[in-house]
Image (tube, grey):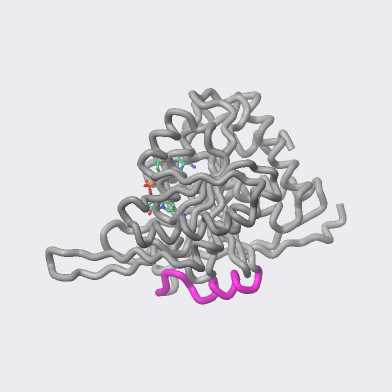
Amino acid sequence: PDFTRTHKITLIPGDGIGPEVTAATINILEAAGKQTGCSFDWHNYDAGADAYAKTGEYIPKALYKSIEQNRVALKGPVTTPIGGGFSSINVTLRKKFDLYANFRPVKSLPGLKSNYPDIDLVIFRENTEDLYAGLEVMINPDIAQSMKIITRKGSTRIAKSAFDYAKKHGRKKIHAIHKANIMKLSDGLFIKCCKEVSEEFPDVTYAEHIVDNTCMQLVLNPYQYDIILTENLYGDILSDLCSAFVGGLGLVPGANLGAECAIFEAVHGSAPDIAGQDKANPTALLQSAVLMLHHIDEAATADKIQAALEKVYAAGKTLTRDVGGKSGTRAFSEAVIAAL
Ligand code: NAD
């Protein structure tokens, strides 16, 4: 390999299990790159409480600048305080860079026992508005108000992302998930926009399901869904639900996509219960990195890693505890490197 292809990538290891799954992922990417002739120039930044302790800023200005310049970031989870404290770093970054499409493929890996074999569905979650706009006020000490923002622009562009993806990848069916029976105006606008976009794609079947029913339908028969298209909050919840079909949060990757840049991160959070114990499964972040490699036109490196990962799962000998194995984060990542 001549290493002429060097990719500058902003790296946010995050906290909790973030540094462990990030280190594992980077080691695997670098080992694969050595075989396919590409290398990585990682631009490393803290965010959240760690960044505040060092720089006095939750998201350092240099981090914003780095993402602006590189246009691609790989991110570990960052802890968000509950009920008070600073705003979510994740939500802030998604809003700042207008990363409006949160793309989360949920696909079974070989060898894992599950009540739901051969799952292959995709979630498109709107990523910038809804109750996540963060517009909250205390009306008085006993009444809190959160504002749900849904716009024609936001709804139409996430619907377009989902339908474009369906067309490009030969997916047949899109379900828009909503609660427009109750939130007649906001969710009503969301499904109106989805329906309008669907009319431009006659080859893709379009349906609408109410979110509570969707939870039951998913547990009864997830195979009826192909692409789930939904708002920010429902998408967040349904992603965790769907991750359970394929072995849990340790597995499901994600991409936050905008017109200018993209941040790749797992669905899971910082998992404080297992942080620093070499127990975390790096598969979700690794598969997010595989999505990133496709995004930067490194398909050969992406395919090589995915094949090695699937070999390790099919063999079933070096898996992490969350999927029934006995190995640690490091041993698992070494097995993937050996399988490259
Ligand atoms: P979580 O996803 O961190 O953990 C939920 C459960 O799944 C835990 O039992 C955990 O051990 C397990 N788990 C998660 N990832 C795993 C992995 N890779 N391997 C093995 N097991 C794994 O959710 P939580 O506990 O609700 O949230 C913890 C913190 O993470 C919160 O501060 C939350 O705000 C934050 N969070 C951040 C992001 C992000 O950075 N994008 C996303 C979700 C939650």
Closer to us: 218 or 99: 218
Q: Which residue is drawn at 65% across and 24% down?
A: 315
Q: In the displayed structure, does residue 202 sit left or right of residue 60?
A: right
Residue drawn at point x = 12 percent, y = 63 percent: 142
Q: Does the magenta stretch include residue 132?
A: no
Q: Can residue 236 be seen in this view?
A: yes
Query: Does residue 49 appear anywhere in the picture?
Result: no
Please determine whether, in this image, residue 45 is positioned above or below residue 308: below
Judge by depth and name the residue closer to the eye, 340 or 249.
249
Residue 58 is inside the magenta segment = yes
Q: Would residue 201 be found to the left or right of residue 241 on screen? A: right
Residue 314 percent location from the top left of the image = 65, 26
- The vertical placement of 317 against 122, above or below, is above
Indicate the position of residue 313 as horizontal and vertical percent values: 62, 29
| Circle count | 0
Residue stretch rendered in magenta on the structure: 56-70
Give the main secondary structure, helix, strand or loop, of the magenta stretch: helix
Q: Nearer the viewer, residue 90 or 115?
A: 115
Q: Where is residue 323 in the image (x, y as percent from the top left)?
A: 50, 30
Residue drawn at the location 37% of the way across and 53% of the way down: 180
